[in-house]
Each structure stands twice: as C-alpha cells, then as structure tokens.
Amino acid sequence: MNIPTSRRGFLLGSGALMVSFSLGAEAQEGEVQAGTNAPQPTVTAIDSERLDSWIRIDENGDITVFTGKAELGQGIRTALTQVAAEELEVEPGEIELITADTGRTPNEGFTAGSMSMPNSGTSIRNAAAQMRRLLVEAAARTLAVAPESLTLQGKKIRSGGRSLSYGEVAAALNLEVPLAGDAVLKAPEALKVIGRDVPRVDIPGKVTGAPAYIQDMRLPGMLHARVVRPPGYGATLAEVDTSAIEAMPGVVRVLRDADFLAVITEREFQAVTAMRALARLARWNAGAELPDQADIQNVLRGLESEVGTVAEQGDANPSGDKVFEARFTRPYQMHGSIGPSCGIARLEPDGTLTVWSHTQGVYPDRAAIAEMLGLEPGRVRVIHVEGSGCYGHNGADDAAADAALIASRLPPGRPVRVQWMREQENAWEPFGPAMSITVRGAVRNGRISDFAFDLWSNIHTTRPGGAGALLAARQKSDPATPNVPRIQISPSGNGDRNANPLYAIPNKRILWHFIPEMPLRVSAMRALGAYANVFALESAMDELARLAEADPVAFRLGHLEDERARAVVQMAAERFGWETAKLGPGRGKGFAFARYKNLAAYLAVAVEVEVERETGRTRLVRAVAAIDSGQAVSPNGIRNQTEGGILQAASWTLYEAVTFDRRQITSVDWSSYPILRFASVPDSVDVHVIDRPGEPFLGTGEAAQGPVAGAIGNAVRDAIGLRLTDLPFTRQRVLAALAAG
Amino acid sequence: MTVKLKVNGTVHEVDADPATPLLYVLREDLELNAAKYGCGLGQCGSCMVLVDGEATLSCVVPILALAEREITTLESLGTQDDPAPIQSAFIELQAAQCGYCIPGMMMSAQALLQRNAAPSDQEIRDALRTNLCRCGTHMRILAAIRRAGEMMSAQAPANRRAG
Ligand code: FES
Ligand code: FES
C-alpha cells in the first residue's frame, strides 16, 4: 500500500484549490519510471475497508482525511472536515481533506442522491472515532494511565502535566488496520464542531480569484481543444476538408476519428476560431428525426414498454362524487451549469492516462474512459477537480472523455484542455427527463379513500457505467453503445421516486409505465422523478383538500403519522403565518411537503406568489421552508443548499423547458432557455432547520425540488382559481389558462 | 500582433490577435482566474470586469477596443488576507454555493457601489440584470451586496449619496 499523502500536487491553500505544476513529485514512489517526472496513475488497490484509506496521521501530526465524494458546490468539503474534526478533537482547519481521486481515495461511487453525508459523512465519522480510540489507547499504555483519564486538545493527548502529540503516538502505531465498525461516537451533547456554522473553506479563495475550478487549471505545455459536435443526435460526418484549418494560426492538428471531430491549438481562442471555421466546413448526414415537441407528452406515453407496480395497498378505485383526476407533465429541463463542462487529460510516458474532471463519479468515469480507449482501468487515473455546480449528470463526463480521447492521440506529456462552449453544453448535456403523470383520488368522509398514480418515465440515471454513456465513445470509430436501461423498483426510487405518497391512504396503487429509451439524451437531474412526482402528488393533495373542504395544511396533517413529517409541516406553516397571512390582490399562498425518497430529509414549504393577469407573469414572492435532515452538521450549509434548491426549483417551475425542432435542440443559449433572473427573485426566502442530535445524517441537497413545484402550483391555484398541470408555468400558459377560464 | 493592455494598474504587452476577447487574454496570458467563461455571448455575467469603472462583459469585448482603458478584475480589489468590503461581505454571509458566478456578481456590484454605496434593492437588482446564478444563491448575493455597501459607507462616509 503506497498512496502518497504529500502536500504537493493539489494543495489546499487557505481553502482554495491550488494546482501545482510539480505533480510529478507526488507520484507513487517506486512506480515512477526512470527519466519521467510525470504522475503515475496508481495501480494500488485502495481498500475502503481499511482505516488508513480514510484517515492518516503522519509523524508531524498532520491529519489527512480521504473521501470518495466530490465537492460540487454543496459544501461537503467543509461538512466532511467538520465530522472528522469532531471525532478527532481538533479544529476543522487542522485537517486536510482529499476528495475523489482514483489514485488516492476510496471508491464511493457517485456524488449523487444527497448521499454524501449519509455515506461518506458516516464512514469518516466512524473512522475518525476509531482513530481517536487507537490514539487514546496507545497513549494510555505509554503513560500507564487509564484511557478515560486522558484529555484531547490541540492534537495532544494529556494526562495531568504530561502529554503526547498525535504525531508521536501515531508514528508508533500500526494504522493499516481494518475499519472497526464498532467505534463509539461522541454523544450528541458532547458535540462541539458538528452543528456549528463553520465557514466554508472554499469561499475566501473563490471570492479573491484563487484558482478554484478545473477551468482554472494551467498545466505546463497544455494545449487547448474544441470539439465540433454534429448538428443533431445520431448525425454522422459525411465529409470534411481539414487542410485549410490545419493552416490556421496556432492549430496543432485537426483530429477526426469517424464522427468525432476536434481541433487542437496552442492557445485557447485559436481553438474557438478554428472550431467555428471547421464547423462551417463539416458536412453531416442527418440523424434520427426528433418528435414534434408540441406532441411530446403523447409520444412519451406511446413509448411505454412495460408497467411496474411501485406500491399497492387495498383496492384503489377512486369513485363517488368527490373525485379529482388530472394529467400532469414535466418537459425536458437542463442542468444548465453556469460554467460549461471542461476536461483535461494527459498521456503519460508509460502509456497511462491522467484525466482531470468535474465528474460526479471518478471510479465509474475511469471505467468508462478505459473501456473507450481499450485500456485496463488501472492505467487510467481520474482526479476530481471542482467545476461549476452541476445538479446531477451534466456534460462533465463527456468533456473528460473528449479530453481523454484527444490526449490519447497526442505525444506523451502534452496535456490537453477541452472546454465546451455554451451552445454545446445546452445541446448535448443529458437533460432531466420529461415525464407524464395521471393522478386520480377520491375523498370520503373528509379523508382520502382511494388514490391511483400512473407515471410515465424512463430510468433517470444513465451515467457511466459503460463507455456507451460517453459522447466521444459513441462518435469515434469502433463506437460503444449505451446500456439498455431496465426498470428497477427500489425503496429510494428513480423515475418513480416519491410517487408513493407518505400520507396514510387505505387504498392506493402506484404504477410506473416504463419508457426504455427517450428521444432526447437524458440522465440524472437533481431529485430525479421526485420533482415531477411530488409536483403532481402535492397538487392533487391540494385539490383533495378542497373536495374535503379542509385547510390544505390541516388536511396533510390529518394524513401524516410520522412525527418528524408533522414537525416540518407545522413549523413551515407557523413561520409562514399560514392561518393569518393577509395577501394582496392577485396573490395566492400554497403549501407542499415531501420526505425525499420517502426515507431521507423531510421538507415542507409554504409560498406566496403573485400572478399578473394582464401579462401572465407569475412571481414567487416569498417562501418559508422547514427541513429536517437528521443531525445537522452545518446548519448554515443546510440553509444555503435549501435556499438554492428553492430558487432553482422555482426557476424550473416557472420558466424552463428544453426546446427542439425535428432535427436538433434549439434552446442553446440563455435567451432560448430562460432561467431565473434577479428581476424575479423573491422578496424573501427563509429556511428553518430542525436539528435531530444523535439521528443519522439524511442529506439535504434535493429535498426542496418537488415540494417547491407543488407549493407554487397550489399558490397559483389560490391566486387565480385555476389548476395548472403542465410545467413550466410560463406567461403564455398562464394567459391561455386564464383565457380558457 | 502586440496590444498594450492596462490591467489592475499594470501595463501588459500582449501578443494576441486583436480580435481576441478580453476574457481569453485575462485568463490565458495574465493567468487571472476571477473572470470566468460562462457563455461567451454576453448573456450570463460570469466574465464581468470593470473598464474605466463600468461593469463590462469581457467575453464580448475584443482587446483591440481596450487600449488606453483601465481594466480592473476582482483580483485587484483585495486578497484573502486583506479582503475588500465586497469580498468580506460575501465571505461573512457565505454567499456562494459552487461560486462560479460569484466573481462576476461581485464586479457588477462593485461598479454599482463605487457610484452609490447605499443602493436600493431595485438598484441592486438592476445592476445584476445580466448576471445569472444557477445554484440559486440570489438571496445571499443580494444580502452580501447590501452588507458591502454598509461597509463601504462606514469606511468612506463622504462617498455616501446625499439624500
Ligand atoms: S461569459 Fe461573458 S456574459 Fe457569459
Ligand atoms: S453559486 Fe453556483 S452558479 Fe452561482
């Protein structure tokens, strides 16, 4: 086992990511071939069952913690450091955290599903508690005192006037031991760092211009590349004369491999100029025709291949005089990262490949890139470097694959940086999938008696996995093909996530009409199916409350048994002033709740909206949310992410739909794909965190998406008396609904 | 061809095609990180810098147009050890998620606050009209700009707008 913990390479300088030019020095000693100073991809297996894969303390007492999860702007770098610091009795600033790198960190799959704190947070906390126990027991033996008599402070273990440093105790210990699994965690009342608002370690660097993102990396000898993508899905490259492009200033070469076309230059803007010229010269054979956007929801229903039962109880047969039935739809929506995707790769002298990527999964991405290039996975090293916020599977893995394919054709030692253009990100990222839902519910004696929920969706997760998930691998010669997705019904759900109501309903039937393949490229977007499912479910709850002549909040409470669910509902309603709020003309209030995945964070939200009848403009005026994500590590971090989730979900709900004609995606910039702007930002957003000391971490990042859509729909219903069922609620849709009355 | 550019008080001789947008020169030749590529179309504000004190989208201005002009980037405002008010305020209010949009937001705000350290909420929103944030950090960004204005007013009361 020989994983470097050197401070060189990627340095945490006052919280910002510093990319050093001397990567070679931190290579695996013993694996570096004579005469090279390049980093060598590791061939050492990192055993996530061993303590030293998670935490190391060197003889100087320097503490390094390893996580397989990646910082995506959600603040986990800070929160995971807090967790480790707590159990090690040190300050967070005394810990260096190494994030997702196949050469250094454990394999924790994807950074997704709001699972970083439940997975990595829990693992690191246990490992840190075990480390503390080992240190204390060893110190007790050396000092010949009882372990309980020792105190820990300032990386020292003290007994009366005597003390030992962490470094000297650790140096004498074998820390290459299995993870214990029975480490005793600190009691909730003894916590000092968990639950404290520790400032994010990355913010000072980011607000002063320190290099913080993959886009800021500058490696010695780095070339720039731009890819010329086809005009639409499945288009193939018929012909291109590259000679004129090769003569352009700065052009190193034009790379064509079947339908993969890229230009490589010395300087970045030369690549942009050459890419544009090359795009004008390339002639493509048209690919598959896209469906008519106006009819897309019917098209999707027609693509159903099988039906899976998500949940069934009693005999759901909504009937009688109090029945609500409606069809809800969600369009394709994009992640729309503000910084388009970027990948950097370098072929090393020994034929291995180093790839820097803002991927959500360094290990799966490594497997996919290795498959694409016909390499053993151990000969590819994928290192996560932060990118712009991604909110799911965006173009990150594709940009990494572009860079890897290009680097594999360049001389060793020449890194290449591929930066996607805005129009490429918008046209080629895998979108959040469109969905269609039919809800039928019946009320009897003031309660929901029957509930039927039919949803049409694909599997939302088409991440790598296989090379077929990568654009470059599908365009090059000997192309990879995507895996064929299969319906999978799991407790946490996927396309069916949160389709099963948490409310107590005697007769219910939840069916997933499975769409195996989508006409547009799709993958995981924040909350997966929960966004559309909760929108439909919470809209229906509001209508069922009306049928029961009940207040929507009281009606929900009447169907909720889980005390923690009831607590967030009550808190959001109370802090909003649900019963007393006085709303002006054209305004309405709406409420919604969900427990994300039905097993993670609880979130309830109350909103006020304003609808201008003349223009159809709908604005979120204020939002008040309550969230319970278990033991709160960083309450301010939870608020920050939840505020972000609320505003992003408001943007999806009010403005966003991918547009396309029969040949290509047409929403390729920010005017054709409008998102929330400052003119429409709410007056206030308040998030209240309910801390649950001693309870498991439940994750935070995705909890708001569905409830916000539901609450806005319900508030619009309150404001104008009409139920909107098709997302997004654009001006045109609102005007059309008002005209139809 | 060589173009002279005055960036953060220093004149640089840059060897680049005069049609190159300022953003690429800042990032590649001068190795400045704060101005970011977001769209290259003048639609998102990630690349915002000041030119003669005015908030300017560096992705759409060719360097040719910038001789003799004062170009200011976020880097020149302050450092981690000695942050400017706008930087202190964003740190204090933890006004970032991924942070990619934030330098551009800060430059739009800086241009506003240099003219008027006590802007109304509407004036702040107007100053940010081209800036997009995808993480939904807007509420904190607005709060941080208000806070920065307070700090700047406290530092230089004479700058405060009459009335
Ligand atoms: S990068 Fe300049 S406005 Fe978007
Ligand atoms: S903080 Fe991520 S885009 Fe604004």
Image (spheres, coloured by chain):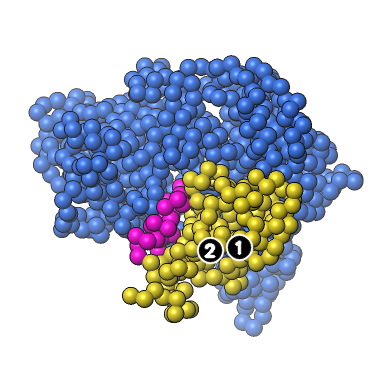
Chain colours: A blue, B yellow
Could you confirm whether marks 2 and 1 are on the same chain? Answer: yes
Nearer-the-camera pick, A146 or A547: A547
Question: Label 1: how many residues lie within 10 Å, few (<14), some (14-19) or many (20+)?
Answer: some
Q: Chain of mark 2?
A: B
**Name of the residue lying farthest toward the bottom:** A161
Ligand 1 contact, mark 1 (Cβ < 8 Å): no
Classify A118 as above or below A688.
Answer: above
> Which residue is the site of mark 2?
B53
Chain part drawn in magenta: B120-143
Q: Is residue B121 visible?
A: yes
Q: Amino acid at mark 2?
A: Gly
For this view, does A538 lie left or right of residue B73?
left
Q: Amino acid at mark 1?
A: Glu
For this view, does B102 lie left or right of residue B129?
right
> Which residue is the site of mark 1?
B70
For this view, does A310 lie left or right of residue A8?
left
For this view, does A129 lie left or right of residue A9?
left
Dot placed on the residue nearer the N-terminal end, 2 or 1? 2
Q: Is residue A506 visible?
A: no
Nearer-the-camera pick, A465 or A471: A471
> Could you tell me which residue is drawn at 63 percent across and 28 percent down?
A279
Percent from the top left, x then y, of residue A114?
Answer: 46, 46
> Could you tell me which residue is drawn at 74 percent across and 65 percent down?
A59
